[in-house]
Image: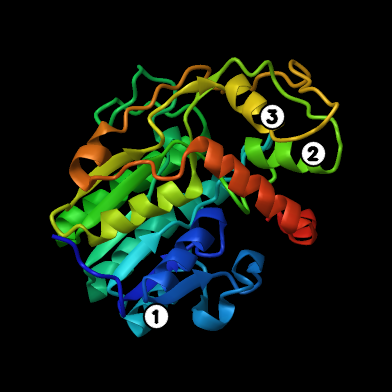
Amino acid sequence: MEDTLKYRRILITGGHGFIGSHLVKRLLKEGAHVFILAREHANLWRLKKVLKNIQVWNGDIINAVEVQTIVRQIQPDYVFHLAADTEHSLQDNSISKIKTNIIGTTNIMEAVRLIGCKKVINLGSSSEYGVTINPINENTPLNPQEIYGITKAAATQIAHHIAKRSKINIVTLRPFNIFGEGASSKNLFTYIISQLIQDKEVHLTHCTQTRDYCYIENIVTGLILAATNTGIKNEIFNIGSGETHPLKFFVEKIFQHFNSQRKPLYGHIPYSLQERLEVTSDVQKIKNKLNWKVVVSLEEGIKNTINWYKNNQEWYVSNIKK
């Protein structure tokens, strides 16, 4: 059976981010009452066109008292926990990631425990698996190699532990790579598209590493299904296209949409020491249990993404790093 999100009170952490902003817009179309939790000076540029239709509550998920106060006042039917410190940099900022990803998640779960709600949908990451055996399914042993993956793996396990102990219904989605409108400048698709629009060189690794890239709207559909399917409780799902290709495959796909004399400059960037060279995704579980499938193809997703960047250059030039 499926629940409806119409008129439901829905709290989203990280609602102003790449994934969260797309989720907000979809939930508004579903007729939901949307609340987002964001830090006081958060850049809400992705939500500019829908701010009048949502409620923004200022608070920091690492502050347990703030989180409990806000959750108690909102009384959400559903909580989508998307907030995370995803920054990848040469500086291993472990403390920030531990605070946001682990303590922040714990605070959200404890706040929900105190007031109750229909379901928590937690956004994990394929980085939780790290360097491991392929294909990667939900039973694959976790072996994260960098602090982001380590903290996300810990956060997922803590969230499910609290949920089990407190009889909270939780579903975690672990996405593989995502692309689409409004993604960070560090996203491969965003970087290539923005460089080509500005007629700049595209510096890349050799791009032999394999990845599964899925368009953002397909991921949002998975999040919605995880919430509305009443028969799904306390589960973890991988989500992605289910098709793995070398990065060079995606690079060439994007270049085909531009009438540019430029060529991708392969090998100009070295692989990182923690680079996962081969990733093969297995998303059969979410297809079987949630009846989820890719609706927007890779080709259509690329077209949508390119068109958005071409039509919103004044937005992403100043904001896309946020």
Give the SS element for disc 1: helix
Give the mark, 3 or 1, whose residue is nearer the N terminus: 1
- Label 3 – label 1 distance at C-alpha: 51 Å
**Residue at the (26%, 43%) spot, across then down:** 236
The quarter of the image holding the C terminus is bottom right
Disc number at residue 256?
Answer: 3
Out of 228 and 64, give the one closest to the viewer: 228
Residue that carries the numbered disc 1 in the rendered image: 69
Residue 318 showing in the rendered view: yes
Residue 61 showing in the rendered view: no
> x, y (%) of residue 183?
61, 49
Give the mark count: 3
Q: Quadrant of residue 314?
A: bottom right
Q: From the viewer's perspective, is the residue at label 3 or at label 2 nearer?
A: 3
**Residue at the (50%, 64%) spot, across then down:** 15
Residue that carries the numbered disc 2 in the rendered image: 195
- Graded by Cα atoms within 10 Å as few (under 14), some (14 to 19) or many (20 or more), the crowding at tag 2 reads some
> x, y (%) of residue 308?
66, 54
Q: Indicate whether 168 appears above or below 266.
A: below
- Label 2 – label 1 distance at C-alpha: 44 Å
> x, y (%) of residue 97?
53, 47
**Residue at the (34%, 50%) spot, across then down:** 222
Give the mark, 3 or 2, whose residue is nearer the N terminus: 2
Q: Indicate whether 157 appears above or below 265.
A: below
What sort of colour scheme is used for the picture?
Answer: rainbow
- Graded by Cα atoms within 10 Å as few (under 14), some (14 to 19) or many (20 or more), the crowding at tag 3 reads few
- Label 3 – label 2 distance at C-alpha: 14 Å
